[in-house]
Amino acid sequence: MKRWNGWMSDVGEMTGLGVFCTLIVTVSNVGVAWAQWPQFGGPRGDFTADAKGLALQWPDDGPRKLWNRELGDGYATIVVDGDMVYTMYRVGNDEFAVALKASTGETVWEHKNPSPFTAEMAEFGPGPHTTPLVVGDRLFTVGTNAVLHCFDKKTGQVHWKHDLPVEFDAPIPGRGYGCSPIAYKNTVIVPVDRKREGAEGGPAGVKPESTTAAKNQMLVAFDQTTGSPLWKNQDFENGYASPILIKFAGEDQLVFFSAAEIVGLNPNNGELLWTHAHRTQYGANLSTPVWNGEDLLFCSAAYDSGSRVIRLTKKDGKTVPEEVWFGRKMRLHHGNPVRVGDHIYGSSGDFGPAFFMGVNMKTGDVAWRERGFSKATCVSGDGKLIILDEDGNLALTTVTPQGMTVHSKCKIAERYAWAAPTLVGKTLYVRDRKRIMALDLG
C-alpha cells in the first residue's frame, strides 16, 4: 500500500471541494438542498458530506458503535432527515419502507408492500436496490417491483402510489427496478419502462412477441403533492443508474445514464438536450455519473466498457457534448466514485480482482491503483475518504493524486455490503444484507 507523508496538507483540497460543491447548487429544490442526506448520493448527489471533526484514526476494532440492529435484505442506502433515518429492506416476498430513530435505530414506522421476486432477481440478492428520497414532509420510495410510494415521512401514511408496471404495461427489469427517484421543483422524476411496441396502443398489427425494438424506457415526472403525472418523455434502452441534476451555463439539466448512452434533459419537461454514446455489455450502466461543477461529466461501467469524460459546451444556444477521453483501465461496476479536485477515485472491477484507483478527470491518466479492497463504495468528508468494500471492511483513508494512505481499517459488516455508507455530521450509517448500524467517527 502506498503511503504519503504529510497527508494533512491535502485536507485543504478536500475541504475546499466541499465549499466549492456547496456553492454549486445541483439540486433545484429547497427542501432537498437543506436536508442532511435526503437522497441517493447525499445533498449534492455526489457522495460528499459537509462533515467536520472526524477522527484521524480509529481503534483497532473500529469506530464506536452508537447502535447496531437487525434489519433485512437489500441494497438501499440510508437517508437522514433531522432525527429520522429512512431506508428499505426485504423479508421473503415483502418489501418494507422503514423509518428509524437516528439516535437509537428504533423503528418509528414501516410499510409493507408485496414484492415477489424471481430466480434472476435472487441471483445476487433480490433487492430493494433503490434509495428513498425526502422532500419537505414527504418520503418517496420505489421498490424492486417498481411500485412508487409517497409517504408522510413522520407517520408513514400513504399519500399516493403508482404501480408503474401495471399502469405503463411494462415488465419489471430483470434484476428488479434500480433507479432512485430524484426531485425537481414540485416534481419527483423516475425512469419508467414504457409500453412495448405491439402492445395496446403500439403500431397496428405488431404483436408484442414479434417486436425487436430495444428502446423501452422513458422518464416520468409526478406531482409531489397529488401524484399526477405532469410529463413523460423520451425513449431509452433500459438502464439502472440513478439520474442526477446539474447546472450548466446557468441551466438546470437532468443527466441520465441509460444502457447505451449518457443524456442531458430539460427537467421541466423531459426534452432531450444532448446525447453521447456509452454502450455496455449486458446494458449494465449502473454507476451514477460525476459532474465537476463546471463543464465535465465522468461516466464509467464494467465488463470492459471503461470510462469516458465528456465536455459540455454551448454552441448556437444549444448544449453540445464533446468527448475528452476514453479508457478501459477504470471500470466501475455498481459502486460509486467520488471526485476530489481534478481526480476521480473509485473501485474498478466486476467479477475479477478489484483495484481502488485514482484517475485524472481532465486527461484520463491513471494516477495510481491499489489492492487491499474488494469491490467498494465510498463517501468523502472532512478531508478524508471512507471506503466500505463488499466484504464489510471499512477504512479511513486519505487520497491524493500521489496515492492513498490507509489510516485505519476494520471488519464492520458482512458480505454483501453493497450499499454506500451515509455520513451526517460525525455519524456514519452502514448496512449490509442483515444489519444496519450507526458509527461515531468523531
Image (cartoon, helix red, strand yellow):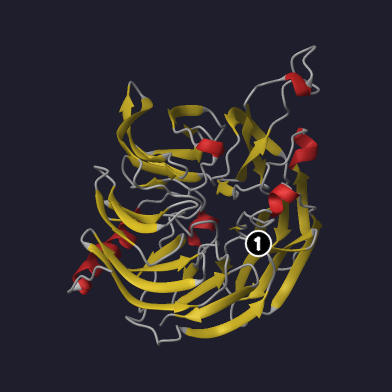
Q: Residue at x 77, y 23 (%)?
A: 208
Is residue 91 among what the camera can see? Answer: yes
Horizontal side of 258 relative to 310 (left or right) equals right
Horizontal side of 207 relative to 364 (left or right) equals right
Res 234 quadrant in image: top right
Q: Position of residue 376 (x, y in %)?
A: 46, 61
Q: Position of residue 72 (x, y in %)?
A: 70, 69
| Quarter that holds the N terminus | bottom left
Q: Badge 1, how many Cα within 10 Å: few under 14, some, many 20+?
A: many
Residue extending farthest top: 205
Q: Report the number of discs.
A: 1
Q: Position of residue 416 (x, y in %)?
A: 58, 65
Horizontal side of 154 relative to 10 (left or right) equals right
430 versus 113 height, above or below = below
Res 282 quadrant in image: top right
User: At label 1, which amino acid type do we have?
Assistant: Gly
Is residue 338 among what the camera can see? Answer: no
Q: Residue at x 44, y 49 (%)?
A: 332
Q: Position of residue 123 (x, y in %)?
A: 67, 53
76 versus 218 height, above or below = below
Query: Residue 16 versus residue 258: which sits nearer the camera?
Result: 258
Horizontal side of 236 relative to 297 (left or right) equals right
Q: Which residue is mark 1?
A: 74
| Quarter that holds the C terminus | bottom left
Query: Residue 307 versus residue 77: which sits nearer the camera?
Result: 307
Residue extending farthest front: 352
Q: Residue at x 52, y 51 (%)?
A: 29
As helix, strand or loop, the secondary structure at mark 1 comes to loop
